[in-house]
Image (tube, coloured by chain):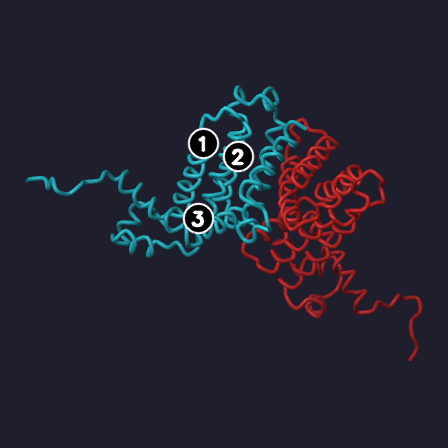
Chain colours: A red, B cyan
Amino acid sequence: MTSTPSRVRMSPQQRRDQLLEIGVRLLRTHPLDELSIELLAEEAGISRGLLYHYFGNKQDFHVAVVRRAVQDIYAITAPQDLDDPMAQLEASLGAYLDYVVENHAGYVSLVRAAAGGNDELREIYQASRRALSDRVFERADGLHDLAAIDTPATRLLAEGWTALVESSVLAWIEDPAGLSRDELLARLAGALVALIVG
Amino acid sequence: MTSTPSRVRMSPQQRRDQLLEIGVRLLRTHPLDELSIELLAEEAGISRGLLYHYFGNKQDFHVAVVRRAVQDIYAITAPQDLDDPMAQLEASLGAYLDYVVENHAGYVSLVRAAAGGNDELREIYQASRRALSDRVFERADGLHDLAAIDTPATRLLAEGWTALVESSVLAWIEDPAGLSRDELLARLAGALVALIVG
């Protein structure tokens, strides 16, 4: 038997990653409940049977896609080693805002699925919120104003702040109400300082 | 024919109001999807048939109960003519917090139903949020710090702030994280000022 070197062989893990990337891309313009195994098969050009091999059922597929999407959000909002902690915070916020703008349909459906009855998606979503709000305390050494105030109370408030950010960003995308992107980011960052510094 | 003066006759409107009050009371300890016509009939001591006369079906009953619940929240958070605008804000916030503490099961289920797929409940819920955030701008004459800053942009931010309030209050009820009721109210009020004054 000879191998066919002209064709790139993907490991099962690589194949699954590739399919998830297609799923996340579809989520940009499709709400979660329109994301079917059939649609994915069509986009990926492979059989439904093979897809069921990678994702047991539609719910497992949705969970895997949402897990990947929240990993993407976590990655793009990573600190960028800016010296000014407020500039850093606004840069992370800006990356989040741009993500929501670019992935609006899917993001809204994810929020609704998580807030509604789906326990597994809610858990992923809440863990993601917590991870994003924990970011605030991650680089405490560089955050002059925010140092030494990492307590359970400020973590609670920072997590509540992510609800403000999400709600305001979604409303702003619908209608900016005369608010520039920079002004929105500055107001949201200022609210965090008020919450955790007091 | 003689009337029976010993018995108080209720108008259909009064009867419906009474049933709604029972529904709202049940919502304190029952999530919305456990609020059945059967349960209401049992609590009210009248037939299911009569209940269907007042509320066409279970969905209509739920919508009517939720409408009444958000009216109650709006009423208890009314301004109390306090001179200090921050004290006023914290008094309204405190009334909201106490309501959520006392009606926890039903409130959580209402938020989930509204955030999930139910369009009619979502609309009532969002209108309620908007009404509560509009309160911030209602007594602008007494709010020295907040006067003359009532714009579409600040209304957007104040509405986002209600998401922070709801999320933080629900988390605080689960685990206060060392935060006193007064400190929580003060932080939330401070965040609003940061958001709309900048």
Discs 2, 1 touching: Cβ within 8 Å: no
Secondary structure at badge 1 equals: loop
Near-viewer residue (B188 or A70): B188
Q: Please tell me in which quadrant of the rendered image residue A196 appears.
A: top right
The amino acid sitting under disc 2 is Glu
Q: Which residue is mark 3?
A: B103
Near-viewer residue (A62 or B101): B101
- Quarter of the picture containing the C terminus of chain B is top right
- Residue visible at 63% across and 54% down in the picture: A126
Q: Which residue is mark 2?
A: B90
The amino acid sitting under disc 3 is Asn
Percent position (x, y) of residue A58?
Answer: 63, 63
State how far apart marks 3 and 1 are (Cα).
18 Å
Discs 2, 3 touching: Cβ within 8 Å: no
Chain label for disc 2: B
Q: Which residue is mark 1?
A: B78
Vertical arrangement, residue A90 with respect to residue A5, above or below: above
The amino acid sitting under disc 1 is Ala
Q: Nearer the viewer, mark 2 or mark 3?
A: 2
Q: Nearer the viewer, mark 2 or mark 1?
A: 2
